[in-house]
Image: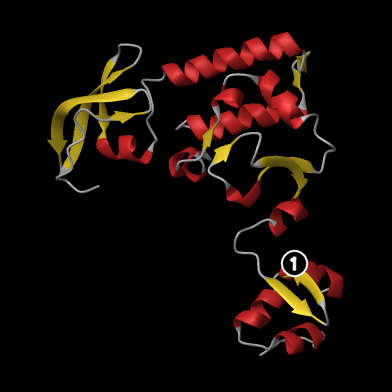
């Protein structure tokens, strides 16, 4: 973040920046007021990156919501939570809790949960329905930056891999498949076809050459 940027008056999540509090080792820390009234000193980079969105009240409210929804809908009995409830809980955690070990890849990158889902497991379950099976997980189609009814679906790991934005399709003899689909169809070890293509092999050679020891 450029040192000259003035964050005073701007909002980040529930924070409203009041003024510059201090500069330590060229790092700026700002005095911020949370919507709940709490005033704290917050690292500027934490504000801009989204790692800090409140004084902690947001996460506490979400935890209370989770507990209420868990009891209300019976998706946690005898200490066991349903797969759908676990999915909902973890989705919110990685998008809102800066202490989550997955926050950097989700909330830290600006990925959010829509209001309809964030505050209600019932809405999530109504929109998504039961998980079809143990091999299914929650998938954001096209790597959308929000979890919500439109971009999300239950899908298998294979389907999710095929949904990757960087997934390349190859047409050969009138058949169009992704690289991973060609690998499975030809019995080629995962990543082998990618390696051949990245070395500049023509599609015909990459698909037709059997695996024989070291390839050059």
Total labels drawn: 1
Return the x and y of residue 177 as percentages of the image width and height: 77, 69
Q: Is residue 157 above or below residue 69?
A: below
Inspect this view and state whether residue 100 appears. Answer: no
The colour mode here is secondary structure
Question: Quarter of the image containing the C terminus?
Answer: bottom right
Q: Compared to 156, does 216 lie above or below?
A: below
Locate residue 68: give its quadrant: top right
Give residue 88's position: percent from left, percent from top. 66, 28
| Residue found 74% across the figure and 28% down from its top | 84
- Indicate whether 148 appears above or below 212: above
Give neighbour class at mark 1: few <14, some 14-19, many 20+ (Cα, 10 Å). many
Left or right of residue 35, residue 122 in this image: right
Q: Name which quarter of the figure residue 56 lies in.
A: top left
Image-based side of 38 in relation to 100, left or right: left
Q: Which image quarter: residue 205?
A: bottom right
Residue 42 on image: x %, y %: 27, 29
Using the image as rendered, state which of residue 169 and residue 195 is in the foreground: 169
Q: What's the residue at 68%, 22% (across, down)?
A: 123
Residue 144 visible? The answer is yes
Give me the residue at 57% from left, 19% from top.
Answer: 119
- Element type where label 1 sits in the image: helix
> Residue visible at 72% across and 40% down?
153
Image coordinates for residue 111, horizontal then vertical, percent: 50, 40
The residue identified by callout 1 is 180
As drawn, is 197 to the left or to the right of 29? right
């Amino acid at each position: 973040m450029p040192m000259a940027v003035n964050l005073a008056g701007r909002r980040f999540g529930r924070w409203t920046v009041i003024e510059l509090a201090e500069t330590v080792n060229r790092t700026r820390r700002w005095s911020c007021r949370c919507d709940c009234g709490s005033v704290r000193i917050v690292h500027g980079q934490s504000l801009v990156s989204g790692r800090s969105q409140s004084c902690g009240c947001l996460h506490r409210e979400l935890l209370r919501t989770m507990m209420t929804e868990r009891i209300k809908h019976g998706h946690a009995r005898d200490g066991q939570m349903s797969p759908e409830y676990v999915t909902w809980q973890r989705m919110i955690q990685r998008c809102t809790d800066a202490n989550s070990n997955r926050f950097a890849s989700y909330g830290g990158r600006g990925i959010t949960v829509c209001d309809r889902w964030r505050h209600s497991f019932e809405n999530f379950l109504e929109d998504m329905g039961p998980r079809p099976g143990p091999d299914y997980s929650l998938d954001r189609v096209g790597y959308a930056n929000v979890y919500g009814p439109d971009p999300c679906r239950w899908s298998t790991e294979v389907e999710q891999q095929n949904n990757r934005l960087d997934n390349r399709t190859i047409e050969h003899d009138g058949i169009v498949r992704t690289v991973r689909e060609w690998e499975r169809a030809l019995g080629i070890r995962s990543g082998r076809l990618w390696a051949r293509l990245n070395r500049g092999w023509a599609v015909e050679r990459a698909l037709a050459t059997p695996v024989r020891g070291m390839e050059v």
